Amino acid sequence: MKTYDLFAPATLAERHALFAKMRSEPGLCRVEPFGAFAAARYEDAAALLKDPQRFSSEALAITAEPPWLGANPVAHSLISKDPPNHTRLRALVSRAFGPKGMARLEARVRQESEALAEAAVRQREVELVDAFTFVLPRNIIGFMLGLDPSTFSEFKRWSLYMGLITSATTPEQREGVRSVVREMSDYLTEVIEARRRQPGDDMVSDLLRAEVEGKALTNAEVLSFLSLLLPAGMETTTQLLGNSVIHLAQRPEQLAQARADKAHLPRFIEEVLRYESPTQLSFRLATQDVELAGTKVPAGSLVLGLVGSANRDERVFERPDEFIPGREKGTQHLSFGYGVHFCLGVQLARMEARLGLEALVSRVSAIRLRSPEIHWNPGFTMHGPAVLPVDLIPA
Protein backbone atom coordinates (compact mmCIF):
# COMPACT_ATOMS: atom_id res chain seq x y z
CA MET A 1 0.00 0.00 0.00
CA LYS A 2 1.44 3.34 -1.08
CA THR A 3 1.72 6.35 1.23
CA TYR A 4 1.01 9.83 -0.16
CA ASP A 5 1.83 13.24 1.33
CA LEU A 6 -1.29 15.41 1.10
CA PHE A 7 0.81 18.54 1.64
CA ALA A 8 3.29 17.79 -1.14
CA PRO A 9 1.33 19.35 -4.04
CA ALA A 10 2.27 23.00 -4.55
CA THR A 11 -0.62 23.80 -6.92
CA LEU A 12 -4.25 22.77 -7.38
CA ALA A 13 -3.32 20.95 -10.58
CA GLU A 14 -0.75 18.92 -8.63
CA ARG A 15 -3.30 18.19 -5.89
CA HIS A 16 -5.82 16.82 -8.38
CA ALA A 17 -3.13 14.82 -10.15
CA LEU A 18 -2.28 13.29 -6.76
CA PHE A 19 -5.96 12.52 -6.14
CA ALA A 20 -6.26 10.86 -9.55
CA LYS A 21 -3.23 8.68 -8.76
CA MET A 22 -4.77 7.71 -5.41
CA ARG A 23 -8.09 6.81 -7.07
CA SER A 24 -6.22 4.47 -9.43
CA GLU A 25 -4.76 2.49 -6.54
CA PRO A 26 -6.52 -0.74 -5.51
CA GLY A 27 -8.20 -0.29 -2.14
CA LEU A 28 -7.39 2.52 0.28
CA CYS A 29 -4.15 4.51 0.47
CA ARG A 30 -2.10 5.70 3.43
CA VAL A 31 -1.56 9.44 3.82
CA GLU A 32 0.73 11.77 5.68
CA PRO A 33 0.87 13.95 7.73
CA PHE A 34 -2.03 12.23 9.51
CA GLY A 35 -0.74 8.64 9.34
CA ALA A 36 -4.24 7.67 8.26
CA PHE A 37 -5.95 5.47 5.72
CA ALA A 38 -7.70 7.45 2.97
CA ALA A 39 -10.69 6.76 0.74
CA ALA A 40 -10.10 8.65 -2.50
CA ARG A 41 -12.87 7.12 -4.63
CA TYR A 42 -16.47 8.32 -4.38
CA GLU A 43 -17.93 4.91 -3.55
CA ASP A 44 -15.45 4.33 -0.74
CA ALA A 45 -15.70 7.85 0.70
CA ALA A 46 -19.52 7.64 0.72
CA ALA A 47 -19.41 4.20 2.36
CA LEU A 48 -17.11 5.61 5.05
CA LEU A 49 -19.26 8.66 5.76
CA LYS A 50 -22.59 6.80 5.98
CA ASP A 51 -21.48 4.04 8.38
CA PRO A 52 -21.18 5.44 11.95
CA GLN A 53 -21.22 1.94 13.44
CA ARG A 54 -17.89 0.97 11.85
CA PHE A 55 -16.44 4.45 11.24
CA SER A 56 -17.04 6.77 14.17
CA SER A 57 -17.18 10.54 14.00
CA GLU A 58 -15.31 10.61 17.30
CA ALA A 59 -12.24 10.97 15.10
CA LEU A 60 -12.99 14.69 15.23
CA ALA A 61 -12.44 14.63 18.99
CA ILE A 62 -8.93 13.29 18.34
CA THR A 63 -8.03 15.63 15.49
CA ALA A 64 -9.62 18.70 17.14
CA GLU A 65 -7.72 18.16 20.40
CA PRO A 66 -4.12 17.40 19.41
CA PRO A 67 -1.71 17.09 22.37
CA TRP A 68 -0.28 20.57 21.79
CA LEU A 69 -3.71 22.23 22.01
CA GLY A 70 -5.54 20.85 25.04
CA ALA A 71 -9.27 21.24 25.66
CA ASN A 72 -11.33 22.40 22.68
CA PRO A 73 -15.16 22.56 22.88
CA VAL A 74 -15.45 21.75 19.15
CA ALA A 75 -14.06 18.28 19.89
CA HIS A 76 -17.23 17.51 21.87
CA SER A 77 -19.74 19.02 19.45
CA LEU A 78 -22.47 17.50 17.34
CA ILE A 79 -20.24 16.38 14.49
CA SER A 80 -18.02 14.33 16.82
CA LYS A 81 -20.98 12.30 18.11
CA ASP A 82 -22.47 9.04 16.87
CA PRO A 83 -26.06 7.85 17.32
CA PRO A 84 -27.86 7.86 19.72
CA ASN A 85 -26.15 10.94 21.26
CA HIS A 86 -25.91 12.53 17.83
CA THR A 87 -29.62 11.90 17.19
CA ARG A 88 -30.67 13.77 20.34
CA LEU A 89 -28.35 16.73 19.79
CA ARG A 90 -29.26 17.07 16.11
CA ALA A 91 -32.97 17.02 16.94
CA LEU A 92 -32.45 19.88 19.39
CA VAL A 93 -30.48 22.13 17.05
CA SER A 94 -31.98 21.24 13.66
CA ARG A 95 -35.16 23.28 14.14
CA ALA A 96 -33.31 26.53 13.54
CA PHE A 97 -32.19 25.25 10.11
CA GLY A 98 -35.58 23.96 8.94
CA PRO A 99 -37.77 25.54 6.22
CA LYS A 100 -39.47 27.93 8.66
CA GLY A 101 -36.17 29.19 10.02
CA MET A 102 -34.76 29.66 6.53
CA ALA A 103 -37.90 31.48 5.34
CA ARG A 104 -37.48 33.96 8.23
CA LEU A 105 -33.85 34.51 7.28
CA GLU A 106 -34.28 34.98 3.53
CA ALA A 107 -35.23 38.66 3.68
CA ARG A 108 -32.22 39.39 5.91
CA VAL A 109 -29.82 37.51 3.63
CA ARG A 110 -31.18 39.38 0.60
CA GLN A 111 -30.88 42.73 2.37
CA GLU A 112 -27.27 42.07 3.44
CA SER A 113 -26.37 40.77 -0.03
CA GLU A 114 -27.73 43.82 -1.81
CA ALA A 115 -26.05 46.28 0.55
CA LEU A 116 -22.64 44.57 0.42
CA ALA A 117 -22.72 44.05 -3.36
CA GLU A 118 -23.68 47.69 -3.92
CA ALA A 119 -20.82 48.91 -1.73
CA ALA A 120 -18.30 46.56 -3.39
CA VAL A 121 -19.23 47.57 -6.94
CA ARG A 122 -19.10 51.24 -5.97
CA GLN A 123 -15.44 50.74 -4.95
CA ARG A 124 -14.74 48.94 -8.23
CA GLU A 125 -11.18 47.93 -7.22
CA VAL A 126 -11.83 45.85 -4.13
CA GLU A 127 -10.49 42.99 -2.01
CA LEU A 128 -13.63 40.89 -2.16
CA VAL A 129 -13.08 38.54 0.79
CA ASP A 130 -13.14 41.37 3.33
CA ALA A 131 -15.73 43.32 1.38
CA PHE A 132 -18.17 40.57 0.48
CA THR A 133 -17.48 36.81 0.52
CA PHE A 134 -16.56 36.64 4.22
CA VAL A 135 -18.64 39.55 5.48
CA LEU A 136 -21.97 38.20 4.18
CA PRO A 137 -21.92 34.85 6.05
CA ARG A 138 -20.29 36.53 9.05
CA ASN A 139 -23.11 39.05 9.35
CA ILE A 140 -25.77 36.38 8.90
CA ILE A 141 -24.39 33.99 11.52
CA GLY A 142 -23.91 36.91 13.89
CA PHE A 143 -27.54 37.93 13.33
CA MET A 144 -28.79 34.35 13.85
CA LEU A 145 -26.94 34.09 17.16
CA GLY A 146 -27.92 37.59 18.28
CA LEU A 147 -24.31 38.66 18.71
CA ASP A 148 -23.10 42.22 19.16
CA PRO A 149 -21.90 43.57 15.77
CA SER A 150 -19.03 45.34 17.55
CA THR A 151 -17.46 41.90 18.13
CA PHE A 152 -17.69 40.80 14.46
CA SER A 153 -14.21 42.13 13.65
CA GLU A 154 -12.68 39.23 15.61
CA PHE A 155 -14.50 36.49 13.72
CA LYS A 156 -12.22 36.24 10.70
CA ARG A 157 -9.12 35.66 12.82
CA TRP A 158 -11.04 33.11 14.91
CA SER A 159 -12.28 31.31 11.83
CA LEU A 160 -8.81 31.21 10.24
CA TYR A 161 -7.10 29.70 13.28
CA MET A 162 -9.89 27.21 14.00
CA GLY A 163 -9.45 25.98 10.43
CA LEU A 164 -5.73 25.46 11.05
CA ILE A 165 -6.07 22.97 13.93
CA THR A 166 -5.40 19.89 11.78
CA SER A 167 -2.50 21.47 9.88
CA ALA A 168 -0.80 23.90 12.30
CA THR A 169 2.91 23.06 12.33
CA THR A 170 4.79 26.18 13.43
CA PRO A 171 4.96 27.42 17.04
CA GLU A 172 3.33 30.68 15.92
CA GLN A 173 0.39 28.88 14.30
CA ARG A 174 -0.14 26.65 17.31
CA GLU A 175 -0.02 29.53 19.78
CA GLY A 176 -2.51 31.38 17.56
CA VAL A 177 -4.87 28.39 17.68
CA ARG A 178 -4.55 28.06 21.46
CA SER A 179 -5.26 31.75 21.95
CA VAL A 180 -8.31 31.70 19.67
CA VAL A 181 -9.82 28.62 21.34
CA ARG A 182 -9.56 30.40 24.70
CA GLU A 183 -10.97 33.66 23.34
CA MET A 184 -13.91 31.98 21.60
CA SER A 185 -14.75 29.86 24.63
CA ASP A 186 -14.71 32.86 26.98
CA TYR A 187 -16.77 34.97 24.59
CA LEU A 188 -19.42 32.32 23.89
CA THR A 189 -19.67 31.40 27.59
CA GLU A 190 -20.51 35.04 28.33
CA VAL A 191 -23.14 35.00 25.56
CA ILE A 192 -24.75 31.84 26.98
CA GLU A 193 -24.83 33.24 30.50
CA ALA A 194 -26.36 36.50 29.24
CA ARG A 195 -29.13 34.58 27.39
CA ARG A 196 -29.83 32.50 30.50
CA ARG A 197 -30.46 35.75 32.36
CA GLN A 198 -32.34 37.47 29.55
CA PRO A 199 -33.51 35.30 26.62
CA GLY A 200 -33.99 36.93 23.24
CA ASP A 201 -35.25 36.12 19.75
CA ASP A 202 -32.09 34.35 18.56
CA MET A 203 -30.66 30.87 18.10
CA VAL A 204 -28.73 30.84 21.39
CA SER A 205 -31.95 31.50 23.33
CA ASP A 206 -33.78 28.89 21.23
CA LEU A 207 -31.08 26.31 22.03
CA LEU A 208 -31.34 27.03 25.76
CA ARG A 209 -35.14 26.63 25.63
CA ALA A 210 -35.22 23.52 23.43
CA GLU A 211 -36.10 20.11 24.88
CA VAL A 212 -36.36 16.59 23.48
CA GLU A 213 -38.10 14.03 25.70
CA GLY A 214 -37.93 16.50 28.58
CA LYS A 215 -34.16 16.97 28.35
CA ALA A 216 -32.55 20.30 27.51
CA LEU A 217 -29.02 21.02 26.34
CA THR A 218 -26.42 21.68 29.03
CA ASN A 219 -24.29 24.82 28.95
CA ALA A 220 -21.32 22.70 27.87
CA GLU A 221 -23.33 21.21 24.98
CA VAL A 222 -24.47 24.67 23.86
CA LEU A 223 -20.88 25.96 24.08
CA SER A 224 -19.61 23.03 21.99
CA PHE A 225 -22.27 23.59 19.34
CA LEU A 226 -21.69 27.34 19.14
CA SER A 227 -17.90 26.79 18.99
CA LEU A 228 -18.56 24.63 15.93
CA LEU A 229 -21.30 26.75 14.37
CA LEU A 230 -19.62 30.14 14.55
CA PRO A 231 -16.60 29.28 12.34
CA ALA A 232 -18.41 26.58 10.32
CA GLY A 233 -21.31 28.93 9.57
CA MET A 234 -18.84 31.34 8.01
CA GLU A 235 -16.14 29.17 6.46
CA THR A 236 -18.00 26.90 4.03
CA THR A 237 -20.07 29.75 2.57
CA THR A 238 -17.07 32.09 2.45
CA GLN A 239 -15.10 29.56 0.41
CA LEU A 240 -18.11 28.75 -1.78
CA LEU A 241 -18.67 32.44 -2.58
CA GLY A 242 -14.97 33.08 -3.17
CA ASN A 243 -14.58 30.05 -5.44
CA SER A 244 -17.74 31.07 -7.30
CA VAL A 245 -16.42 34.58 -7.97
CA ILE A 246 -13.16 33.13 -9.28
CA HIS A 247 -15.05 30.98 -11.77
CA LEU A 248 -17.26 33.89 -12.82
CA ALA A 249 -14.11 35.91 -13.48
CA GLN A 250 -12.32 33.12 -15.33
CA ARG A 251 -15.41 32.05 -17.29
CA PRO A 252 -17.15 35.18 -18.64
CA GLU A 253 -19.78 33.01 -20.37
CA GLN A 254 -20.92 31.82 -16.93
CA LEU A 255 -21.32 35.41 -15.73
CA ALA A 256 -23.29 36.22 -18.89
CA GLN A 257 -25.58 33.23 -18.34
CA ALA A 258 -26.11 34.14 -14.69
CA ARG A 259 -26.96 37.73 -15.64
CA ALA A 260 -29.38 36.59 -18.33
CA ASP A 261 -31.12 33.92 -16.26
CA LYS A 262 -31.16 33.74 -12.45
CA ALA A 263 -32.19 30.09 -12.73
CA HIS A 264 -28.65 29.34 -13.93
CA LEU A 265 -27.10 30.27 -10.58
CA PRO A 266 -28.22 27.20 -8.56
CA ARG A 267 -26.75 24.91 -11.26
CA PHE A 268 -23.56 26.99 -11.29
CA ILE A 269 -23.28 26.86 -7.47
CA GLU A 270 -23.65 23.07 -7.38
CA GLU A 271 -20.87 22.69 -9.93
CA VAL A 272 -18.60 25.00 -7.91
CA LEU A 273 -19.33 22.82 -4.86
CA ARG A 274 -18.32 19.71 -6.81
CA TYR A 275 -15.42 21.10 -8.78
CA GLU A 276 -13.91 23.34 -6.08
CA SER A 277 -14.99 21.57 -2.88
CA PRO A 278 -14.87 24.05 0.05
CA THR A 279 -14.35 21.09 2.43
CA GLN A 280 -11.61 18.77 1.21
CA LEU A 281 -11.79 15.90 3.71
CA SER A 282 -13.66 14.31 6.62
CA PHE A 283 -12.14 12.32 9.49
CA ARG A 284 -13.48 9.03 10.86
CA LEU A 285 -12.19 6.46 13.39
CA ALA A 286 -12.45 2.71 12.82
CA THR A 287 -14.41 1.28 15.77
CA GLN A 288 -13.31 -2.31 15.07
CA ASP A 289 -11.14 -4.27 12.68
CA VAL A 290 -12.91 -3.59 9.39
CA GLU A 291 -12.45 -3.97 5.66
CA LEU A 292 -13.15 -1.17 3.20
CA ALA A 293 -12.48 -1.39 -0.53
CA GLY A 294 -10.61 -4.62 0.06
CA THR A 295 -8.25 -2.99 2.57
CA LYS A 296 -8.05 -4.26 6.15
CA VAL A 297 -8.24 -1.37 8.60
CA PRO A 298 -7.30 -2.08 12.25
CA ALA A 299 -9.55 -0.83 15.04
CA GLY A 300 -8.60 2.63 16.25
CA SER A 301 -7.21 3.75 12.86
CA LEU A 302 -7.92 7.20 11.47
CA VAL A 303 -9.64 7.03 8.08
CA LEU A 304 -10.14 10.05 5.81
CA GLY A 305 -12.88 10.55 3.28
CA LEU A 306 -11.17 12.66 0.60
CA VAL A 307 -14.13 14.75 -0.52
CA GLY A 308 -12.08 16.79 -2.98
CA SER A 309 -11.04 13.59 -4.71
CA ALA A 310 -14.43 11.85 -4.57
CA ASN A 311 -16.05 14.85 -6.26
CA ARG A 312 -13.71 14.38 -9.24
CA ASP A 313 -14.18 10.59 -9.48
CA GLU A 314 -14.43 9.64 -13.15
CA ARG A 315 -16.50 6.57 -12.19
CA VAL A 316 -19.34 8.85 -11.09
CA PHE A 317 -18.94 12.17 -12.91
CA GLU A 318 -18.44 12.22 -16.67
CA ARG A 319 -15.50 14.47 -17.69
CA PRO A 320 -14.92 15.32 -14.00
CA ASP A 321 -12.13 17.84 -14.63
CA GLU A 322 -14.38 20.00 -16.80
CA PHE A 323 -16.62 22.68 -15.30
CA ILE A 324 -20.14 21.85 -16.50
CA PRO A 325 -23.04 23.47 -14.57
CA GLY A 326 -26.22 21.42 -14.80
CA ARG A 327 -24.28 18.22 -15.42
CA GLU A 328 -25.87 14.81 -14.81
CA LYS A 329 -25.50 13.86 -11.12
CA GLY A 330 -24.43 17.44 -10.48
CA THR A 331 -25.99 17.51 -7.00
CA GLN A 332 -24.50 14.17 -5.90
CA HIS A 333 -21.22 15.67 -4.70
CA LEU A 334 -20.08 15.03 -1.11
CA SER A 335 -19.26 18.66 -0.24
CA PHE A 336 -21.97 18.79 2.43
CA GLY A 337 -21.18 15.33 3.76
CA TYR A 338 -23.24 12.16 3.58
CA GLY A 339 -25.40 10.14 5.96
CA VAL A 340 -26.31 11.19 9.50
CA HIS A 341 -23.80 14.05 9.47
CA PHE A 342 -25.12 15.66 6.28
CA CYS A 343 -24.60 19.39 6.88
CA LEU A 344 -27.33 21.02 8.99
CA GLY A 345 -26.67 24.38 7.35
CA VAL A 346 -26.95 23.21 3.74
CA GLN A 347 -30.08 25.26 2.99
CA LEU A 348 -28.54 28.36 4.53
CA ALA A 349 -25.26 27.96 2.61
CA ARG A 350 -27.08 27.52 -0.70
CA MET A 351 -29.35 30.48 0.05
CA GLU A 352 -26.47 32.78 0.97
CA ALA A 353 -24.54 31.76 -2.14
CA ARG A 354 -27.55 32.19 -4.44
CA LEU A 355 -28.71 35.55 -3.07
CA GLY A 356 -25.17 36.86 -2.66
CA LEU A 357 -24.25 36.02 -6.27
CA GLU A 358 -27.59 37.32 -7.58
CA ALA A 359 -26.88 40.68 -5.95
CA LEU A 360 -23.34 40.79 -7.34
CA VAL A 361 -23.88 39.59 -10.91
CA SER A 362 -26.86 41.90 -11.43
CA ARG A 363 -24.53 44.88 -10.85
CA VAL A 364 -21.49 43.92 -12.94
CA SER A 365 -20.76 43.32 -16.60
CA ALA A 366 -17.38 41.73 -15.85
CA ILE A 367 -15.22 40.57 -12.95
CA ARG A 368 -11.46 40.74 -13.46
CA LEU A 369 -8.91 39.12 -11.18
CA ARG A 370 -6.17 41.61 -10.40
CA SER A 371 -3.59 38.83 -10.22
CA PRO A 372 -3.40 35.59 -12.21
CA GLU A 373 -2.16 33.83 -9.06
CA ILE A 374 -4.80 32.92 -6.50
CA HIS A 375 -3.62 33.18 -2.88
CA TRP A 376 -5.40 30.16 -1.37
CA ASN A 377 -6.10 29.64 2.33
CA PRO A 378 -3.36 27.82 4.26
CA GLY A 379 -3.94 24.26 5.40
CA PHE A 380 -5.66 21.40 3.65
CA THR A 381 -9.13 21.04 5.15
CA MET A 382 -10.81 24.19 3.77
CA HIS A 383 -10.34 25.31 0.17
CA GLY A 384 -10.90 28.86 -1.03
CA PRO A 385 -9.13 32.19 -1.61
CA ALA A 386 -7.54 33.88 1.40
CA VAL A 387 -7.73 37.21 -0.43
CA LEU A 388 -9.48 38.05 -3.68
CA PRO A 389 -8.45 41.40 -5.25
CA VAL A 390 -10.73 42.10 -8.23
CA ASP A 391 -11.93 44.81 -10.55
CA LEU A 392 -15.71 44.93 -10.66
CA ILE A 393 -16.90 46.48 -13.93
CA PRO A 394 -20.34 48.04 -13.31
CA ALA A 395 -23.19 46.95 -15.55
Image (tube, rainbow, N blue to C red):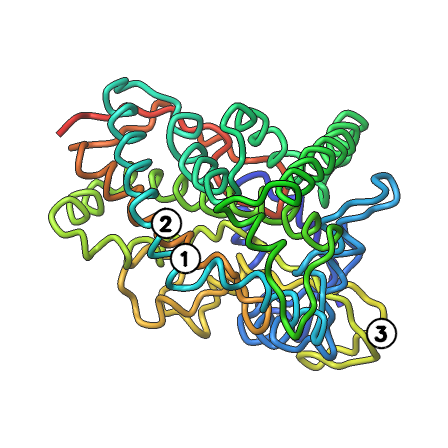
Q: Is residue 83 visible?
A: yes
Q: Residue at x 67, y 75 (%)?
A: 27
Task: Please indicate whether residue 135 sits to the left or right of residue 171 in the image.
Answer: left
| Above or below, 386 relative to 383 | above
Front of the two marks 3 and 2: 2
Q: Amino acid at mark 3?
A: Pro
Identity, as a three-letter code, of the amino acid under mark 2: Leu
Q: Residue at x 65, y 41 (%)?
A: 197
Which quadrant: the C terminus?
top left
Q: Amino acid at mark 1?
A: Gly
Q: Which residue is mark 1?
A: 101
- Residue nearest the observer in this picture, 316 or 53: 53
Contact between labelled residues 2 and 1, with CB atoms less than 8 Å apart: yes
Residue 13 seen from this side: no
Q: Is residue 222 above or below residue 70?
A: below
Q: Quadrant of residue 78?
A: bottom right
Q: Residue at x 58, y 38 (%)?
A: 10
Tag 2, which secondary structure? helix
In 3D space, how far apart are the residues under numbered discs 3 and 2 (Cα atoms)? 45 Å
Q: Which residue is mark 2?
A: 105
Q: Secondary structure at mark 1?
A: helix
